[in-house]
C-alpha cells in the first residue's frame, strides 16, 4: 500500500496571466498533522481546492489515496473538509445542524453524537449556535467535516479570526485527530498557529514550494547570529562594512549589526572589531526560532495575488 495520502507532480493552476500554483511536487505521508503555511495569497487555498476536486489543474497531476484528483468521486467518501468559514442555521441547536448535514450526506444518525464528542461540544450540543463563540463554531464545522469518519481531513485556515483561546482549542483538537491516525491537512498564513500541532510542514510562496518535510528538518535550517553594538551609534555602518569585507552575512538592525556565524566565531568578531579600531558595548549570541526561519523563507511582509 502506498504510504502517501497525497502526491502531486508538476501541479499548476493559472488564472489568466496569474500563476497561483506553480509546478508543485508533494509527497504527503499518511497519518498526523500536515501544515501548509505561507503568506496570504501564496497558493495554499488553490492547492487545497485542486486536491479536493473543486477546481481543475491547468497542468500537472495529483492523487489522493492513489486516486487521481481529476476523479474526486473515487475518494470523496474518505475525505472530510472545512473550506472557509462554516455556515450554520443560528437559531437551532448544534445537534440539529449536524443532524441535518448527516441526513444530506446519508450518514447514520448515531454518528452525530460521536462527532460532537470528538470536538468537545457534547455538553453544549443542545444550545443554539447563535450562542456559540467563534472558536466553538469552528469546532462545530470540524464536527460536520468528520461525519463520514474520514481518513483525510482538510481544513483551510481553521484558526483565522480566532482569539488566542480559540486558537488553542482548535490546535489541541487537530493534534488529537492526528494522533488517532487520520491525516489532517491544515493551511495557515501564520506558522505559530499550527507549529505546536504539525508533524510535517509544507512552506509555499508565490505558488512554489520552499520546503516540504518533517518539522524537525525545518528546525535544522535555523541560523545562529551575533548582534553587535559599537560604542558610538554613528559607527554602525562602518562596523558592518568590516564584517561584510571579511565575508560574513551581515544585516543592519536598529542600533545593531547582525552577523550570521558558526558557533565558534563570536571571539573572531570581537577581534575584528578591535583590530579595526572599534570598541563594542554589546555582543549577544542568539539563535533563530522556527518563526524566524519561516519569515526569512517566505518574506512574509510581502502580500501576493492568488
Image (spheres, rainbow, N blue to C red):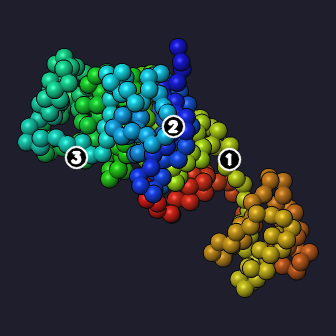
Q: Secondary structure at mark 1?
A: loop
CA distance for labels 3 and 2: 41 Å
Is 76 in front, or is 143? 76
Q: Secondary structure at mark 2?
A: strand
Q: Is residue 32 left or right of residue 285?
A: left
Which dot, 1 or 2, sits closer to the camera?
2
What residue appears at the point 74 percent right and 79 percent down from the top-left corner? 237
Residue 164 placed where, x, y %? 37, 50
Which dot, 3 or 2, sits closer to the camera?
2
- Which residue corresponds to mark 2? 60
Q: Residues within 10 Å of mark 1 (few under 14, many from 20)?
A: few
What residue appears at the point 80 percent right and 52 percent down from the top-left corner? 263
Q: Is residue 290 left or right of residue 54?
A: right
- Residue 9 drawn above or below residue 67: below
- Which residue corresponds to mark 3? 133
Q: Is residue 143 left or right of residue 203?
A: left
- Residue 304 drawn above or below residue 154: below
CA distance for labels 1 and 2: 29 Å
Q: Residues within 10 Å of mark 2 (few under 14, many from 20)?
A: some
Q: Secondary structure at mark 3?
A: loop
- Residue 249 drawn above or below residue 71: below
Q: Is residue 80 visible?
A: yes
- Which residue corresponds to mark 1? 221
Q: Is residue 42 visible?
A: no
Total labels: the figure holds: 3
Identity of the residue furthest to the top in this view: 1
Q: Earlier in the sequence, mark 1 or mark 2?
A: 2
Amino acid at each position: 500500500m502506498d504510504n502517501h495520502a497525497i502526491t502531486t507532480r508538476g501541479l499548476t493552476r493559472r488564472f489568466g496571466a496569474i500563476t497561483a500554483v506553480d509546478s508543485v511536487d508533494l509527497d504527503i505521508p499518511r497519518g498526523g498533522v500536515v501544515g501548509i503555511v505561507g503568506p496570504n495569497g501564496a497558493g495554499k487555498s488553490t492547492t487545497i481546492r485542486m486536491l479536493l476536486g473543486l477546481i481543475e489543474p491547468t497542468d500537472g497531476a495529483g492523487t489522493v489515496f492513489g486516486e487521481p484528483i481529476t476523479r474526486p468521486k473515487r475518494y470523496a467518501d474518505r475525505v472530510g473538509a472545512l473550506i472557509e468559514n462554516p455556515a450554520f442555521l443560528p437559531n437551532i441547536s448544534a445537534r440539529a445542524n449536524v443532524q441535518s448535514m448527516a441526513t444530506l450526506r446519508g450518514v447514520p444518525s448515531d454518528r452525530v453524537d460521536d462527532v460532537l464528542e470528538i470536538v468537545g461540544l457534547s455538553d453544549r450540543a443542545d444550545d443554539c449556535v447563535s450562542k456559540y463563540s467563534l472558536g466553538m463554531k469552528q469546532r462545530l464545522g470540524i464536527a460536520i467535516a468528520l461525519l463520514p469518519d474520514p481518513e483525510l481531513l482538510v481544513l483551510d485556515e481553521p484558526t483565522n479570526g480566532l482569539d488566542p483561546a480559540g486558537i488553542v482549542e482548535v490546535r489541541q483538537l487537530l493534534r488529537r485527530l492526528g494522533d488517532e491516525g487520520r491525516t489532517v491537512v491544515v493551511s495557515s498564513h501564520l506558522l505559530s498557529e499550527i507549529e505546536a500541532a504539525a508533524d510535517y510542514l509544507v512552506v509555499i510562496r508565490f505558488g512554489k514550494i520552499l520546503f516540504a518535510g518533517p518539522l524537525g528538518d525545518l528546525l535544522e535550517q535555523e541560523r545562529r547570529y551575533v548582534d553587535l553594538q559599537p560604542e558610538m551609534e554613528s559607527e554602525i555602518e562602518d562596523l558592518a562594512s568590516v564584517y561584510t569585507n571579511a565575508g560574513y552575512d551581515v544585516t543592519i538592525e536598529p542600533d545593531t549589526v547582525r552577523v550570521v556565524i558558526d558557533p565558534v566565531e563570536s571571539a573572531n568578531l570581537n577581534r575584528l572589531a578591535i583590530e579595526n579600531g572599534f570598541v563594542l558595548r554589546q555582543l549577544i549570541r542568539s539563535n533563530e526560532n522556527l518563526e524566524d526561519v519561516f519569515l526569512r523563507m517566505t518574506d512574509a511582509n510581502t502580500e501576493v495575488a492568488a
